[in-house]
Amino acid sequence: MPENFMKNKILVTGGAGYLGSHTCIALHEAGYDIAVYDNLSNSSREAINRVSTLIGQKIEFIEGDIRDAELLRQVFASHEFFGVIHFAGLKAVGESVVKPLLYYNNNVGGTIILLEVMAEYDVKSLVFSSSATVYGDPDTLPIDESSKRFCTNPYGQSKLAIEYILEDLAKADNSWNLIALRYFNPIGAHSSGQIGEDPNGIPNNLMPYISQVAVGKLEKLSIFGNDYPTVDGTGVRDFIHVTDLAQGHVAALDYLEQQISSNKINISKKKSVGFLPINLGTGGGTSVLELVNAFTEVTGRDISYQFTDRRLGDIASCYADIDKAKFLLGWKAKLSIHDMCQDSWRWQILNPNGYD
């Protein structure tokens, strides 16, 4: 594309977080103009500074909460957005069990306010950060988008509740274009090692825990269950590189733009996207032990671990059917488990204390 050509402007809520910051880079590389809206409750302003350095351009940043309707109105009134990528939300499963009202208020209530303001300013294209947790314990594998939805914790319930809201909104008003990207298990970091996953306190997710054991910050990894009906008894998940995931958001926005442009040309066939759920995964599973062994192979660091009892709500296996993403978005994951381990380790050793 021409050097100064920019596509439509996109508001990225939660753009300072792990997934949001990587997606900002992918959006910029694809030619999108972006503004980030984040309350920094579970993210860092430093992530935005580093993204700005990596892309060679200062990112417009607004510090704000999605529950602040008046601030959102000011933001929408001063911009001409094509659409929104909505990452903003609390995401710790354990915390959601202890503080369910906080999760419903922030995740569900905040999304409702965001949608109301979008409607006021006639911005009706949204890519929502959903999750494979909406599938619960699947009856069959791989999991496709028509699989039953059932959640076992308030975090997952909040994601599912938002999906139901988006479905109902699309039924009530056919001018909406709503894509829910159901992520499987994002890991890895940007290849520069400058941005990555920076959890508060002891990590909830597997890869940063492995990395912190490898660097000596944590003593050993606890593997919850070694008696599942899997290749080695440990849980199997569909791990996807965060960079591939970010590219999935670009593909989703490109798809929306193409559909809307086509509707403008073919008025007689005008039809919105409505509500469209799409899985983002690799289409294959890797066990916890296989991931640990891959990390050791890539980094040369042995990971001390112990087996403990299964956690309530954990399932044996979970991996995606990705045919819909391939067919509609022309997207598929490209990076391997070894790439995920290598990039995670680079981020860890360059940033032993995260963004601090």
Image: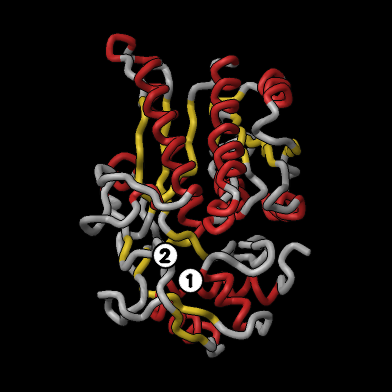
Q: Which mark is residue 339?
A: 1
Residue 271 screen position, x and y as percent: 32, 18
In the picture, measured across the screen, residue 82 lies left or right of residue 337, that is right
Taking depth in this image into account, of 352 and 103 the one nearest to the observer is 103
Q: Residues within 10 Å of mark 2 (few under 14, many from 20)?
A: few
Mark 1, secondary structure of its residue: helix
Q: Give the mark count.
A: 2
- Quadrant assignment for the C terminus: bottom right
Q: Is residue 88 visible?
A: no
Q: Which mark is residue 312?
A: 2
The mark closer to the camera, 2 or 1, is: 2
Q: On the image, which quarter does residue 166 sit in? A: top left
Residue farthest left in this picture: 140
Q: Residues within 10 Å of mark 1 (few under 14, many from 20)?
A: some
Residue 168 screen position, x and y as percent: 38, 24
Q: Earlier in the sequence, mark 2 or mark 1?
A: 2
Q: Which mark is residue 188?
A: none
Taking depth in this image into account, of 306 and 126 the one nearest to the observer is 306
Gap in angstroms between the C-alphas marked 2 and 1: 31 Å
In the picture, measured across the screen, residue 36 lies left or right of residue 248, that is right
Q: Residue at x 76, y 54 (%)?
A: 46
Q: Is residue 351 above or below residue 13?
A: below
Q: Is residue 114 visible?
A: yes
Q: Residue at x 67, y 84 (%)?
A: 216
Residue farthest right in this picture: 356
Q: On the image, which quarter does residue 192 sit in? A: bottom right
Q: Amino acid at mark 1?
A: Asp
Mark 2, secondary structure of its residue: loop
Residue 145 screen position, x and y as percent: 29, 44
Q: Is residue 65 above or below residue 192?
A: above
Q: Amino acid at mark 2?
A: Leu
Residue 330 screen position, x and y as percent: 34, 45
